[in-house]
């Protein structure tokens, strides 16, 4: 599962800034958004996220406490907008 999530991240990350973004399925957007949080040290709570990313080395139990750069916050906000636009489940 981790390999498939990371493969999706690699595909999405290479194209994230382009206008074709609306074509990305919900699972790829989910993986890209959560990869940002994983990289910043978030401790996942859902079974899906823990299976995909694990919690090794995590530091922050609350998502609001995760120290994201302005660029990462903008990226997450963009992904969340796209998820809403695509009708992805929260």
Image: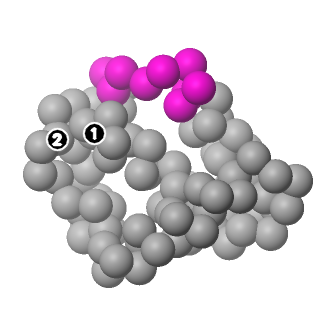
Please tell me in which quadrant of the rendered image residue 52 appears.
Answer: bottom left
Locate the C terminus and report the quarter of the image it occupies: bottom right
- Residue 28: where, in percent of width, then height? 58, 67
* Disc assigned to residue 42: 1
Residue with the mark numbered 2: 58
Left or right of residue 29: residue 41: left
At a point 79% along the width and 58% down the height, the residue shown is 21
Alpha carbon distance from label 2 to label 1: 5 Å
Left or right of residue 40: residue 32: right
Please tell me in which quadrant of the rendered image residue 42 appears.
Answer: top left
At a point 64% along the width and 45% down the height, the residue shown is 80
Label pair 2/1, CB-CB below 8 angstroms = yes
At a point 43% along the width and 24% down the height, the residue shown is 68
Left or right of residue 15: residue 29: left
> On screen, 88 above or below 81?
below
- Residue 84: where, in percent of width, then height? 72, 52
> Which range of residues does the magenta coloring cover?
65-73
Query: Regarding mark 2 in the picture, which secondary structure is present there?
Result: loop
């Amino acid at each position: 599962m981790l390999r498939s999530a990371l493969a999706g991240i690699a595909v999405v990350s290479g194209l994230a800034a382009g206008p074709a973004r609306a074509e990305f399925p919900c699972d790829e957007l989910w993986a890209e958004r959560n990869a940002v949080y994983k990289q910043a040290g978030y401790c996942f709570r859902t079974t899906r996220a823990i299976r995909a990313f694990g919690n090794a080395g995590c530091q922050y139990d609350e998502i609001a406490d995760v120290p994201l750069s302005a660029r990462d916050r903008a990226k997450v906000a963009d992904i969340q907008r796209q998820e809403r636009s695509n009708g992805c489940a929260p």
